[in-house]
Every structure is written in C-alpha cells, then in structure tokens.
C-alpha cells in the first residue's frame, strides 16, 4: 500500500513539473515543424475539458528531437476550447499544428479514422493521446526502428490471450503486457496511450466505416485498428519490453473509455464481434510463446 502511494505521489510531482515546463515553453518557444521529417505525421484527438489542456501535449511533440512534418488535431465541431487554450493553440497553428473540425462525434476514433481524407504526402502516421507528456526521443524511437514500414510499431501493448484448451478469450484484464519476446507473433494489441506508428499502406477505407464501427466496436478503436491492419498483412510489435507509460497531464483523470471497456469486459465482446467483418479467425492471434490462461 505504501509503495502504491509513493508511486502516485511521484507521478503527481512529475506531472506537476512537466506541466509547468511545457506551459512556459508554450509561452515562449519558437520551435516549429519547418524542418520536420516529411515521412511522418502525428494525429490525435481531444474532447470536452481535455480540449483546454491539449496544448501541453502538443508542446511536448513540438519539442521532439526528430520532428514530424505536421500535427493533426481532430475535434468534434461542437467542442470549444477555453480562452487560454485557444490562445496557445493559435500560436501552435503558426508552428505546424493543423486543427480539423469534424461533423460526427466518434469518440477516440477521431484520432485516426479521418486521416485518409488529408493529402497523403506522408508514409507513416503516429497516433498520440491528448493527456500525456511525450519524451524528447519518442518520435526518434519510431523513425530509427529497423522494422519501420514492415510492422505496426508501439511502445505499449497487451498480448491477446486465450483459455488453454479452447479458443475463448480470457478476461481483458488478464491479457499480459507485451514484451519483445512476443514480437514474432501477431498477438500484440497496441494500446494507443504511448503512441502507435502505422504505415499508411496498412490502412484503408474501413478505418472510417462508422456504421459498422458503431454496431461492432464502438468503444475500442485499438481493437478495430488492430484487426484492420492484420487483415492488410501487418503484424504488431513493441519497441521496448518495459511497456512505456508516459507521465499524464496533471489535469488528467481516469480514462473514461478504459473504465467502460475493462469494467464491463466490452473489449472481449468487441474483439469477437469484429472478427467476421475483417474476415479473420482467432487462431491468427495465438502467440508462439504460448500465452494461455
């Protein structure tokens, strides 16, 4: 109990420190994307009160040691930022940020499902969360990875896990965090909070089939994107075995969708619902290192 408390205090203090640092950077920094890597763009979404603080996350992306060509922020048209947030976002618009307002509120799917609508002058799209501080070499880890372009790359993922003597999925909470020993299989489900890198060829128009998404997988964009890219011949791998989970913004609360999906085991249902749509079978996700429960 005491160690858990100490860890929470450490996270709080780290988040407080980074919030101050990136707020000051947002005030005075002139870093822009004019010399960004043309092959890479960043895509993220935000909503509600989080819109008021997303400029802090964006500032951490603008400060990368290797910069992307563009940062796309997708927002539902009825969501409006506070005056302070609007001030900083307007400054960031001059430094490489692009804000796109959309007609449908498709929750977290906004971070990637519209990306094929923009000019495709890039090779890779990296999704980011709106309430995380990304370390300076975060993008470099993707850019310099030897498997770039061959696989879906992520810093954090879980291993899709089945019961030992059946093809029934075990509880999502029992799916272990992935490590590099799982990279030779297709059992890794990238989880988006720490960033996921998609070759643009791994995506197609099913990414925005919102009617099917609402019927089959409304709360689990990570699962939908995993099945989509698998059906296009791409497996997923983690860059590190320690499953990076970066400091959250101090304003961040418990993840709404994660609480819905894990608490009600909707991830399992949505995974199974979506298999037929993509023409896939469960056996295609069994890991070679035999992660069973």
Image (cartoon, rainbow, N blue to C red):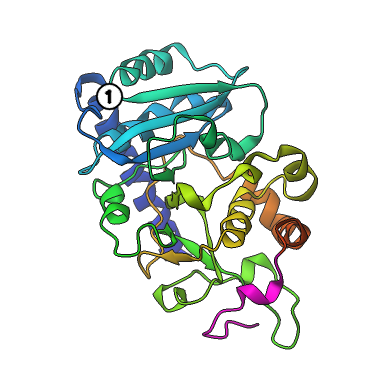
Q: Which residue is mark 1?
A: 26
- Which secondary structure is most common in the magenta stretch? loop
In the shown orientation, is residue 153 left or right of residue 192? left
Q: Secondary structure at mark 1?
A: helix
The outermost residue toward the right is 215
In the shown orientation, is residue 80 left or right of residue 166? left
| Residue 138 position within the rendered picture, expressed as x and y whole percent measured from the top left | 30, 50
Image quadrant in which the C terminus is located:
bottom right
Image: 139 above or below 211: below
Image: 233 above or below 219: below
How many labels were placed on the picture? 1
Image: 112 above or below 290: above
Image quadrant of residue 164?
bottom right
| Residue 130 position within the rendered picture, expressed as x and y whole percent measured from the top left | 46, 37
Q: Residue at x 41, y 23 (%)?
A: 98
State which region is magenta.
Answer: 280-293
Quick one: 105 or 16, which is closer to the camera?
105
Graded by Cα atoms within 10 Å as few (under 14), some (14 to 19) or many (20 or more), the crowding at tag 1 reads many
50 drawn magenta:
no
Quick one: 200 or 2, which is closer to the camera?
200
Image quadrant of residue 104?
top right
| Residue 100 position within the rendered picture, expressed as x and y whole percent measured from the top left | 50, 23
Q: Is residue 161 in sight in this rendering?
A: no
Q: Is residue 240 in sight in this rendering?
A: yes
In the shown orientation, is residue 37 left or right of residue 222? left
Q: Residue at x 40, y 14 (%)?
A: 84
| Residue 211 position within the rendered picture, expressed as x and y whole percent measured from the top left | 77, 39
């Amino acid at each position: 109990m005491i160690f858990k408390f100490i860890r929470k205090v450490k996270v709080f203090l780290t988040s407080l420190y980074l919030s101050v640092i990136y707020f000051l950077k947002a005030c005075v920094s002139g870093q822009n994307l004019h010399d960004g890597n043309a092959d890479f763009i960043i895509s993220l979404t935000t909503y509600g009160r989080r819109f008021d603080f997303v400029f802090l996350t964006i500032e951490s992306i603008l400060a990368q040691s290797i910069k992307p060509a563009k940062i796309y922020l997708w927002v539902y048209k009825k969501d409006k930022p506070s005056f302070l947030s609007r001030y900083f976002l307007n400054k960031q618009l001059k430094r490489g940020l692009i804000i796109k307002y959309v007609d449908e509120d498709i929750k977290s799917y906004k971070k990637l499902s519209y990306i094929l609508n923009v000019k495709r002058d890039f090779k890779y799209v990296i999704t980011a969360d709106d309430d995380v501080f990304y370390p300076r070499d975060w993008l470099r880890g993707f850019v310099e990875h030897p498997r770039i372009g061959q696989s879906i790359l992520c810093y954090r993922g879980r291993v899709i896990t089945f019961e030992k003597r059946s093809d029934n999925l075990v509880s999502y909470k029992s799916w272990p965090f992935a490590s590099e020993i799982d990279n030779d299989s297709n059992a890794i489900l990238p989880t988006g909070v720490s960033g996921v890198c998609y070759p643009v060829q791994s995506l197609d128009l099913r990414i925005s089939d919102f009617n099917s998404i609402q019927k089959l997988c409304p709360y689990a964009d990570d699962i939908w994107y995993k099945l989509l890219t698998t059906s296009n011949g791409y497996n997923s791998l983690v860059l590190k075995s320690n499953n990076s989970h970066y400091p959250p913004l101090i304003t961040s609360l418990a993840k709404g969708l994660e609480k819905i999906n894990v608490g009600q085991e909707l991830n399992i249902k949505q995974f199974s619902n979506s298999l037929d749509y993509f023409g896939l079978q469960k056996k295609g996700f069994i890991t070679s290192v035999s992660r069973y429960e």
